[in-house]
Amino acid sequence: MNKKVMVITGTRKGIGRYLSEYYLAKDFIVIGCSRSESDLKHENYEHFCLDVADEKAVKKMISAISKKYGKIDYLINNAGIASMNHSLLTPLSVVEKVFKTNVFGTFVFCREVAKVMSRKKFGRIVNFTTVAVPLNLDGEAIYAASKSAVEKLTMILAKEFGNYGITVNALGPSPIKTDLIKNVGEEKLNKLLSRQAIAKFGTFKDVSNIIDFYLSDNSKMISGQILYIGGVF
Ligand SMILES: NC(=O)c1ccc[n+]([C@@H]2O[C@H](COP(=O)([O-])OP(=O)(O)OC[C@H]3O[C@@H](n4cnc5c(N)ncnc54)[C@H](OP(=O)(O)O)[C@@H]3O)[C@@H](O)[C@H]2O)c1
């Protein structure tokens, strides 16, 4: 298998869909997943319908990929959900849902894919956080807390996987116009943008630019890093 094999989570729409098409255009084999079916048709694209927090289903998916291709080069843990609400109005069921997808899902994919990567002593894992973490955004306590956990996972897994030739990094988009933020009011978005060094919306290209950097052959010494879009620190 000469082609690069990439697993991306949350590929039905938004950033994950863009990344699938972007890396398919680079002649990668892309294996995606989401809870609903995808309408992406491409000879090098395969879709699994699953919830990223369903450990059994994830294990089955990764085992099938490993059997078919014998390796996984890259994992992009993009699937994520948000809860943009005041804590006083947030039921525990929502907290559970957000943590299941964002934290448990990211963890189980990192663990299962790293097992496959470790056999080849090579792998690149990219996780997704958000600028809501460094900005400590009010109204996003649960979302930001879940992504803080993703950041800590990223840093510690970078250490645990380092000896297996696997790097683990994360990127934190600033607001990008997808369904994830469609219900956030204009005033709130403008307030958020004004706190960035570069007060603009992020783009899909900003995301793939950072991922390209993390995946580069020259980035083998880059691990445990968190890079935010828009000049947020
Ligand atoms: N857009 C932004 O402004 C922004 C800013 C900062 C960070 N981010 C991060 O960027 C990532 C992508 O966000 P986006 O804006 O592209 O969101 P989006 O447009 O809402 O897309 C989310 C994708 O994830 C899938 N997904 C959600 N929950 C899932 C689950 N439990 N299991 C499997 N798939 C699941 C969805 O498909 P199904 O519904 O079919 O499952 C969909 O394909 C997320 O991690 C998000 O936190 C986005």
Image (cartoon, grey):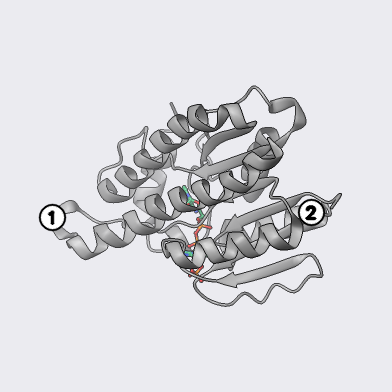
Q: Residue at x 65, y 22 (%)?
A: 221
Q: Viewed as shown, does residue 232 lie left or right of 206?
A: left
The amino acid sitting under disc 2 is Phe
Q: Residue at x 49, y 42 (%)?
A: 174
Give the quadrant of residue 125.
top right
Q: Residue at x 35, y 40 (%)?
A: 149
Question: Which residue in the structure is indicated by mark 1?
Answer: 88
x%, y% of residue 208? 67, 44
Secondary structure type for disc 2? loop
Question: Which residue in the structure is indicated by mark 2?
Answer: 28
Q: Viewed as shown, does residue 227 lie left or right of 98?
A: right
x%, y% of residue 51? 46, 67
Mark 2 or mark 1: name the one nearer the start of the chain.
2
Secondary structure type for disc 1? helix
Question: Is residue 226 visible in the rendered structure shown here?
Answer: no
Q: CA distance from mark 2 to mark 1?
A: 45 Å
Viewer-nearest residue: 191 or 139: 139
Looking at this view, name the residue that lies furthest to the right.
2
